[in-house]
Amino acid sequence: MSPNNLIDHAIDEKPEFKAKYLVSNNAETEAKLKNSGKNVQVDAEEGMIDPYCQRICDLPDDMLLEILLHVPTKNAVTTEILSKRWRHVWKMLDKLDFKDDQGSESFGRFIDKSLQLHEAPKLASLVVELGPTTCPVDVDVKKWVDKAVKHGVRELDFKLLWTPGKPTSLSESLYTCDTLVSLTLSDQILVDVSFPATMPSLLNLSLLYVEYKDEDSVARLLSSCPLLFKLVVARLDEDSLTNFTVKVPSLKRLIYKTRFHNEEEVEEEEEEEEEEEEYYIKTLVIDCPALTQLRLFDNRADYCSLTENMFCLDEVFIPYVPNPDEKFLTCLSSTTRLYLDFSLSMVTCNTAFKFSRLIELYFLIQDPVDWMEPFICLLQNSPKLKALSIVTAGCRPFSCYWNQPSTTPRCLSFQLETFKWIDYGGKEDEKQLVTYILANSNCLKTVDIQLIPTCNLEECRKELESIPRISPSSRLLYSLEMPEEFSWTV
C-alpha cells in the first residue's frame, strides 16, 4: 500500500481525519510539521498541504501512526517495505487489529511474526480474528496473550473460528491481568480457570459461544472481577454446562442468550428429545443485586432464577423465558422499561405483581394463550405507565375472554400517552380491548395501529375512527405496512 493510498484509506475510514491533519489552519498540525525539520510548504489559498511540495513521508511519527491506526494492521505492517522512513513506524502502534478475512492458513504465522517485531512499550488494544481454517500447528496463541499482558493491554478481543479442532486454552496470565478493562472471547476458546484469578480492572466481559472446562471456571472468572460493569454471554446449546450462575455484586448490565448452530440442528435436537426418556434440566441463576439492565434470550434453559435482592432493575428485555416462576416475575417489579414475551407459563403465575415504577411496556404475544385478563391485571398494577405497545405478531387466531375491571386502571386515567398495537387483526376481542383503552385514556396523545396484511385498510380505518376517544387531542395512525424490526438498546 503506497503512502497516498494510506491517506485515502484513512480519510475513507474517518472523514474527520482530513480536517484534523491536513488543513493548514489547524495550529497544532502546522506546528508539528514545522518542528519536524522538513521543508513544508502550505497552500494558503486552498488551506491544504501542497502535495507537490510535501510528501507524506515528511510527517512526524505521531501523525504517521495516526494514519496507520485507520488502516487494517496487516496493511500497516507492510508499509515497512516502502522506505527506510517507514521501516519502524508501524512497530510503535499501540492498537493492533488482526482479522483474517481470507481464511489463510499462513495468517497465524503472520500475526506471530508481527508481534515478535512489535516494539511499542504499551499495547492499548489487541484484536485477533482467525479462521475459518484448520488450526495451524505452529501457532501459539498463548504467546500472543502473554505479549499483550506484558505490555499492559487494556482491550483484548480473540475470535478463533478454527474448524475442526478442539477449543484452545489461553494463557493463565490472561486471568491475572491487572490492566485489562475489556475482554471478548469468541468461539473455539476453552475457558479454563482452574487456578486463583484476579482481574481488578475489568469492566466489560463478553463470552461468545465459547466452551467451559466446568462450572467452577465460570465462578472463578466472574468472582475475579470486582469492578465488572457489563457481561455478555452467548451460549451454544451443546456446551458442557448444566448450571450457569452469574454472581457478580458490581454488575450493572447483563445480556444472556442461547442458540443452536442452525435450524437443522434445532429440528434434530427436538426429534432426539422426543425419543429420549431422560431430559437434562439446565438452569440459569442470576445473583446481581446492583443489576439495572437485563436482556435475556433464553431459548433453551428449563429454569431461570433471579435472586430476591435484585431491587435495582430498571430496564428489562425478555423475549423468551420458558419457565419463569413467581420469584422471577417479582424481581421485575422495579423496572421502568419492560419488554415481555407473555408465555403460557406466565398465565398460571400469580398476576398480583406491582410494577410501581413501570413507564414503558412492550407486551408481546406469540403463543395462543388467553392473555387479555392477565394483561388488564398488569395495567391495574402499573399506575405510572406512559407508553404501551401490544404485539400479536406470529400469534395464531385465538379468542380471548376478559371482563372489564370494576375500576379503571390508574395508568389509563392519568398517565398513558402513547398506545401502539402491532399486527392488529380486527377480531372482536381485539376491538373490545382497543375500545376500552381509548374510552378510558384521558391523557392519550398518539394511537398507532399497524394492521395485519390481510386486513381491509378502508374498512378498518372507518371502524377505528368510529371508536370514541375520551382524549380529544389524541392522533390516530394506522397502516398496512410491515413494522420495522424492534430494537431496544441496553
Image: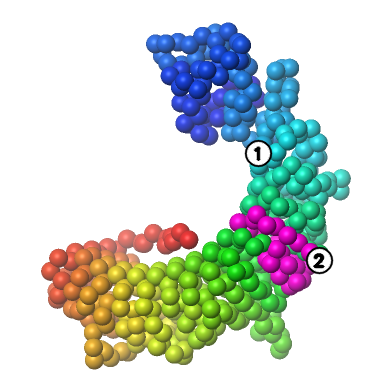
Whether 110 is drawn above or below 36: the answer is below
Q: Amino acid at mark 2?
A: Ser
Residue for point 75% across, 56% down: 176
Q: Tell me which corner region of the image, top left, top right, bottom left or bottom right, holds residue 104.
A: top right
Q: Position of residue 393 (x, y in %)?
A: 40, 71
Q: Nearer the viewer, residue 381 or 310?
A: 310
The range drawn in magenta is 196-224
CB within 8 Å, label 1 to label 2: no
Residue for point 58% across, 15% down: 35
Q: Position of residue 380 (x, y in %)?
A: 31, 83
Residue for point 15% across, 75% down: 470
**Circle 2 residue:** 194
Name which of mark 1 and mark 2 comes first in the sequence.
Answer: 1
**Left or right of 22 in this view: 263:** right
Residue 268 shows up from this direction: no
Numbered circle sitting on residue 95: 1
Q: Secondary structure at mark 2?
A: loop
Q: Position of residue 284 (x, y in %)?
A: 62, 76
Quadrant position of the N terminus in the picture: top right
Residue 487 shows up from this direction: yes
Residue for point 61% across, 20% down: 60
